[in-house]
Amino acid sequence: MLPRQLRANVKWGIVLLNAFPKKIRIFDTTLRDGEQTPGVSLTPENKLRIAKSLDELGVDVIEAGFPAVSKGEMEATKLIAKEGLRAEICSFVRGVEKDIDMALKCDAQSVHLVIPTSDLHLEYKLKKTREDILKLVEESVQYAKDHGLIVELSAEDATRSEFNFIKEFFAKGLSVGADRICPCDTVGILTPEKSYKFFSDMRKAFKDTIISAHCHDDFGMGVANSIAAFRAGANQVHATINGLGERAGNAALEEIAAALRLIYSVEVSIKTELLYRTSQLVARITGSPVQPNKAIVGENAFTHEAGIHTHAILAHPSTYEPISPEIVGVTRRLVAGKHSGSHGINASLEKIGLRPTDKQLKEISMRVKIVGDKGKKVTDADLMAVAEAVMGLPQTRPISLEELTVVTGDRVTSTASVRLKLNNKVVSEAATGLGPVDAAINAVRKAVLVVEPILLENYHVKAITGGTDAMVEVIVRLRKGDRTATAMGVREDIVMASVEAVLSGMNVLMTDYNKRGDKQTEKS
Ligand code: MN
């Protein structure tokens, strides 16, 4: 039985308990198909960091890499296999003995053996006949099995192949010991209807085998096609964090895991509360940011600005939240903007202990809308300053910058030293970093750490005007415990703009009017 909170979440969904396998295995390919995302390339150490977090997340299989491709890939696969993770560590191989030898050298437990089956690939890529392919399957599966490997056999471009041939292909592989089979939708041309039919036929032909779906997102249907495949009996899925992958990417793991658990009540081994954290780590390490409106893990997935919504959310979150944010490890955010109503703004101000009168609140909302109408973002720091001005409170801040020195250059590590006034005491710290901005922010964080552990969760920079003397706008989001604050810094100097933004956000998080005891006008 699902916990009560989850049950509340599935109430609105379509629950099709009988049609799905009881459990769906998750085969993660973030480090293989995901790394084939244009422009993404990972070092072995970074691959290991991601593998560890995938293992913690609970995936059943980690496809660690394609060792035959480069020395680094080989090293990475080896490094991950040696880590002794709970998940099965798999290596991508083609139907080539050399590839399988490499997988063995890396100590992988399994191979994802991929051989094309469509006439298009046979004719133009491999220049081989169907007979050649069947022979290749037999030989390579046999070779991998002889060497003690678990074999997941994939038919590349299966959804554009003749079905009878795929049947022959998999039957041949299974006859020599393949453990799992996967007909790939390599170029993402399935639709949910086609996927259901295709995987029903697959299930009819291969009754007791683990059948995997491998769907690409070229038409934005990768997840929907995977779900349709499960309904037809597929009991494993290939997926990537943030939907990374070749071209438009692969089916997104976080969306599949959330849908299976919350809508379809199907068992998955994924700890959904780690999804956001894992997504952030992958985005940071791959340098491939998550689009803000991305389902489950996007910045806006649990952020509310519109007045009608925030009002209702505050009264009862499920009015506008189909998923409770904590289930996927996210904190709900209410942001101020031109769509905001006074309820949302009041809730934000309450967090820092400000209690405006109804008249003041109206004035604050109006000023926020004016800023919003100019097309500007209203950060938490802006909102605090507006409220203080309207309420006639002195803008005293717990932290102020006294001095900052940054040294950077070609052959030196960037170093920053900072002197801050922190709750009226002078604190000095120094730190190094990857470049001047990182060094400066590290120094500030180190100095403030004495009082409060504050994390930098998000950092965005853009040049407002062109040229090397451009105004630079830095927007940050900081976190202290379960509270977050956004703030902005605008300067010609990127280091100063960054420090200004960070300090301003820290000041919001460290401000608590309840403790300061400033006299606020009593509520009318
Ligand atoms: Mn693929």
Image: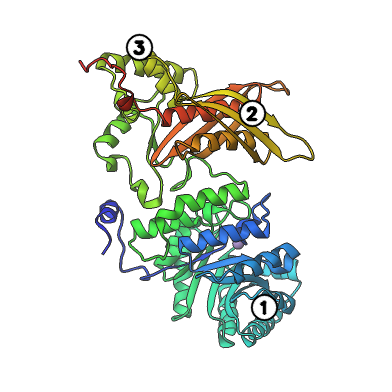
Q: CA distance from mark 2 to mark 3?
A: 32 Å
* Neighbours of disc 3 within 10 Å: few (<14), some (14-19), many (20+): few
Three-letter amino acid code at disc 1?
Leu
Disc 1 designates what residue? Answer: 104
Provide residue 235's location: percent of width, then percent of height.
Answer: 44, 71
The answer to whether 219 appears left or right of 516 in the picture is right
Rendering quarter of residue 319: top left
Q: Considering only order in the chain, which callout, 1 or 2, is on the residue closer to the N terminus? A: 1
156 vs 331, nearest the viewer: 331
Q: Which tag is nearer the camera, tag 2 or tag 1? A: 2
Q: Is mark 3 within 8 Å of ligand 1?
A: no
Q: Residue furthest left?
A: 524
| Dot label at residue 392 | 3
Camera-nearest residue between 396 and 299: 396
**Pointer 2 or 3: first along the chain:** 3
Asked if residue 91 is positioned above or below residue 6 in the image, the reply reads below
* Circle 1 Cα neighbour tier, 10 Å, few/some/many (<14 / 14–19 / ≥20): some
* The disc label shown at residue 495, or none: 2
Residue 11 image offset from top left, x and y in percent: 26, 53
Q: Quadrant of the C terminus?
A: top left
Ligand 1 - quadrant of the structure image: bottom right
Measured as percent of width and height from the top left, residue 182 is found at: 54, 71
Callouts 1 and 3 close, C-beta under 8 Å: no
Task: Indicate yes or no: mark 1 CB to ligand 1 under 8 Å.
Answer: no
Q: Is residue 8 left or right of residue 208?
A: left
Element at badge 3?
A: loop
Q: Sequence-wise, which precedes: disc 1 or disc 3?
A: 1
Q: Secondary structure at mark 2?
A: helix
Amino acid marked by disc 3: Gly
Give the image location of residue 412, x and y in percent. 76, 39
Q: Residues within 10 Å of mark 2 (few under 14, many from 20)?
A: many
C-alpha gap between disc 2 and disc 1:
48 Å
